[in-house]
Image (cartoon, rainbow, N blue to C red):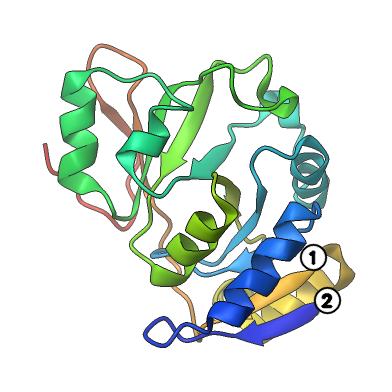
Amino acid sequence: MKVLQIIEDNINNRHIEEIVAVLRDGGIIVYPTDTVYAIGCDALNNQAIERICALKSMKSAKTNLSIICSDISEVAQYAKFDNTQFRLMKNNLPGPFTFIFPAMSKLPKAFKGRRTVGIRIPENKIATAIEQELGHPILTTSVPAQDDDYRCEPELIAEALGSQVDIVVDSGRGGLIPSTVVDCTGSDPEIIRQGKGDLSY
């Protein structure tokens, strides 16, 4: 496991390329978002997804999975949404929200059997740079934590996860409040977890 220090206002492109090379090889990273530190992998790599599910003791067939996209046009490749839901995303993204939509079949077999996918477009330059260099979505889930310090301090996250991840991106102390989760699978959007973001309709 390697720790890379990256400052959001001064991103080292060589570090981003190194991170993406690890993702393309099926690796797992810890990286900052606009809410909490997250664990991520290539969202189109089924074996990497299973590694993350095992790390968090999640049964992939029964767990909601979320992906980070670079923009709404990319979201359209992986999730189904209508014009009203498009405007909702446009009003709130990038930002600290996870929108749940019906999933498209383009996602890997780890998503099969589940009808939905969580969509994130975080307002964080590091997360965006990694996703754009990779060229397609990152599977994302919050870092498991023993306590608040372990959730937001990269050095402690690296200590806790050890060899279970390949790279930890150290961008300083992270946040503690998760994203606001909005279920868009019904007739009207429903906030099922109020987090950092206040939804604008």
Image quarter of the N terminus: bottom right
Left or right of residue 87, residue 1 in this image: right
Residue linked to disc 2: 1
| Relative depth, front residue between 28 and 14 | 14
Tell me: 136 left or right of 125.
right
Horizontal side, residue 11 vs residue 42: left or right:
left
Q: Is residue 31 left or right of residue 198?
A: right
| Circle 2: residue type | Met
As drawn, 157 above or below 194: below
Residue 20, image quadrant: bottom right
> Could one spot residue 145 in this view of the protein?
no
- Give the residue number, with chain letter if any, for mark 1: 165
x then y, percent, for residue 105: 58, 16
Q: What percent of the width, then of the height, locates residue 179?
A: 39, 52
The residue at the point 54 percent across, 76 percent down is 152
Q: Is residue 87 visible?
A: yes
**Residue type for callout 1:** Val
Q: On residue 20, which mark appears?
A: none
Check if mark 1's residue and mark 2's residue have beta carbons within 8 Å: yes
Identified at 74% across, 40% down, the residue is 45
For residue 69, above or below residue 183? below
123 is higher (above) or lower (below) than 105: below
* Residue nearest the observer in this picture, 149 or 142: 142
Label 1 – label 2 distance at C-alpha: 6 Å
Residue at horizontal 54%, vertical 44%?
137
Q: Position of residue 117 (x, y in %)?
A: 51, 29
Sooner in the amino-acid sequence: mark 1 or mark 2: 2
